[in-house]
Image (cartoon, rainbow, N blue to C red):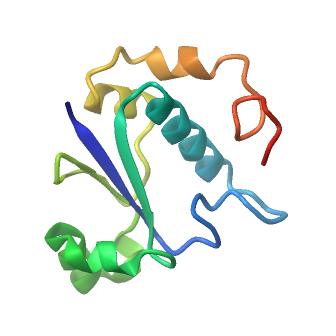
Amino acid sequence: MNTLTIFDPALCCSTGVCGPGVDPELMRVSKAVDRLTAMGEAVVRYNLSQEPGAYVANPVISKILREEGDGGLPVTLLNDEIYKAGAYPTNAEFCRALGLSEDALEAGLAGTSGCCGGAGCC
């Protein structure tokens, strides 16, 4: 099983989906991660402001921070190797990395509303 690990820049909360001005890209990533984990996929997400130790402990991410600072984030690792840096994977890229059909995530998100898959719990 493949594992995706997302290293976010410093965000105000664990997903960055809070406050009056929510970034649509962060909303998309949050929904995708929630859906993928609900499907049983191995996806881990770290936030620099809340979990800095994870960044220091990972040699790939630590090197990026030393060389580029937090401007090199976000970084997504696939099985501990850089999969995408400087931007979040698209939904299709998430699926490809995890060996899913490219539309598996889109199909799973169809008909949902809100960041909690229609539960309105945000």
The location of residue 43, given as percent across then percent down, is 37, 43
In the rendered view, does 10 fall on the left or right side of 73? right
At 77% across and 29% down in the image, what residue appears? 118
Q: Is residue 61 left or right of residue 118?
A: left
In the picture, residue 58 is in which quadrant?
bottom left
Against 101, residue 13 (above or below) is below
Q: Is residue 18 left or right of residue 86?
A: right
Q: How many marks?
A: 0
Does residue 95 lie above or below 52 as drawn?
above
Give the image location of residue 66, x and y in percent: 23, 85
- The residue located at (59%, 58%) in the rendering is 15
Quadrant of residue 68 within the rendered picture:
bottom left
- Of residues 25 and 48, the one nearer the viewer is 48
Q: Where does the image place residue 93, in percent across and percent down from the top left?
A: 36, 33
Q: Is residue 15 left or right of residue 88?
A: right
* Residue at 34% in and 83% down: 69
Frontmost residue, 8 versus 34:
34
Q: Quadrant of the N terminus?
A: top left
In the image, residue 84 sits, relative to residue 18, either above or below, namely above
Q: Position of residue 120 (x, y in %)?
A: 83, 38
